[in-house]
Amino acid sequence: MKITDVKSAVIGNNIVIRVVTDKGIDGYSQIESNKDYVQPVIPHFKSMILGCDPTNVEDVLRRMRRAGAFKPWGKVFSSIEMALWDIAGKEAGLPVYKLMGGKVRDKVRVYNGSFRDPNPPHAVADTPEKIGENILHLNEIPEGFTIVKVASFWHTPYYKEEDAYNTYYPENAGGMHIRSGSLLTEAAFNKSVDFVARIKKVVGDRVGLALDIGPGFMPTDIIRLAKALEPYHLLWLEDTIAGDYTPYTMASVYRDVTASTSTPIHTGEQIFLRQNFMDLIETRAVDVVGPDPADVGGIAELKWIAEYADLHGILMAPHGTFDGVFGMAALTHVCSTMPQNYIAYEFPGINPGFWMDIVEGVPDNFLRDGHVKVWDKPGIGVTFNIAKAEKHLSAQDKDFFM
């Protein structure tokens, strides 16, 4: 079997990758397209792997790895990797989890990610109390999330608008793309603790609570804040120092933060390759790592990092792959094989709603009680209904399935 083409198309909110072979077995994956326009990168890697046997996954990756890097290069590399595993599983007639050592759990815990509650109590949750009530509703619906991550502090508009909270020094407030971080005023510190306290008063211990709060904090501020939040037993504080939008890890600074508090500290979604996790793991700079399989180098890379983190007593909570189905399927397979340090992966949502109409293979009611059932079809277990999927292709992508 040989690779004959690597194609891409925008479907919904994602760029979908198709690795084509001369045997009629194709592999699919997806890229989170809301951060980087990555399609021009695809020919860069395609030229390196044409003619290769896609089932020799590591051999193909070795040809590309030297040309990979942080976003957007790592996104394309990672998505091609997942598509190769899809092909290898289909060729062997086995689900991908069998190729990664076999599953140790039949269902995989997830947290909310980009999942959209179809009928939340509050369409606009503009107070911590309303946020708490929406969290409880995520637990009460059939999907039944037992862990919910809340966008907080830098990741919420209430901490960017001066007339709402007026908490951070405005000259450094750069929206989601923080330029250099910001110092907390005393008012900001108090408002931040109050924000969490009011949510927890509503939620109690019924749902595990994690906060995505950065990057952008200064170390002295996050140490004080993390210590003040210790009574609320958060699952983690995510990307406090570096993280999304930052192509570096700041492991030594994270180590100082983590050593100063019992509140778990989490990062990792932007990092490419295991080598760039070494300092975070070997120095125990964080309590939880959260690689994104569509950034870190793929699902085998994610599994390796999980195993290495487990050897160092560090937990694993993988980042999601945004909307769509293929990333969710790949995450389910690899997370079913991870050791006991696994917490949950970020469920990427199935948005827009037409996704479930254009794919086949996903079992009914696959997400219930906060877990995704592991299914057994070959590859990652998802294929396109091409006749239906073609209707969602743009004019420039009409040859995607040809």
Image (cartoon, rainbow, N blue to C red):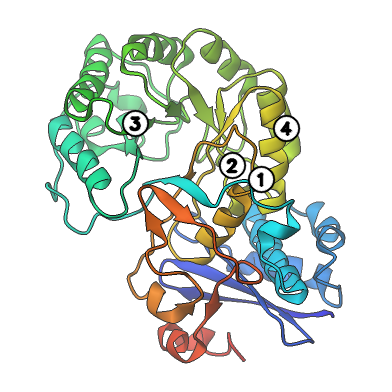
Q: Residues within 10 Å of mark 2 (few under 14, many from 20)?
A: many
Which amino acid type is marked by label 4? Answer: Tyr
Mark 4 and mark 2: span between their CA atoms?
A: 13 Å
**Residue at the (40%, 69%) spot, across then down:** 364
Left or right of 229 in this view: 3: right
Q: Position of residue 255 (x, y in %)?
A: 60, 15
Q: Quadrant of residue 332?
A: bottom right
Disc 4 or 3, which lies upstream in sequence? 3
Report which residue position mark 4 lands on: 308
Q: Label for residue 291? A: 2
Q: Position of residue 53 (x, y in %)?
A: 85, 73
Disc 2 or 3, which lies upstream in sequence? 3
Q: Label for residue 302? A: 1
Image marks 2 and 1: residues in contact by CB distance under 8 Å? yes
Disc 1 or 3, which lies upstream in sequence? 3
Mark 2 and mark 3: span between their CA atoms?
A: 19 Å
Circle 4: element type: helix
Circle 2: element type: loop
Between 273 and 248, the one nearer to me in the picture: 273
Which amino acid type is marked by label 2? Answer: Pro
Report which residue position mark 3 lands on: 209
Q: Nearer the viewer, mark 4 or mark 2?
A: 4
Q: Position of residue 379 (x, y in %)?
A: 66, 69
Mark 1 and mark 3: span between their CA atoms?
A: 24 Å
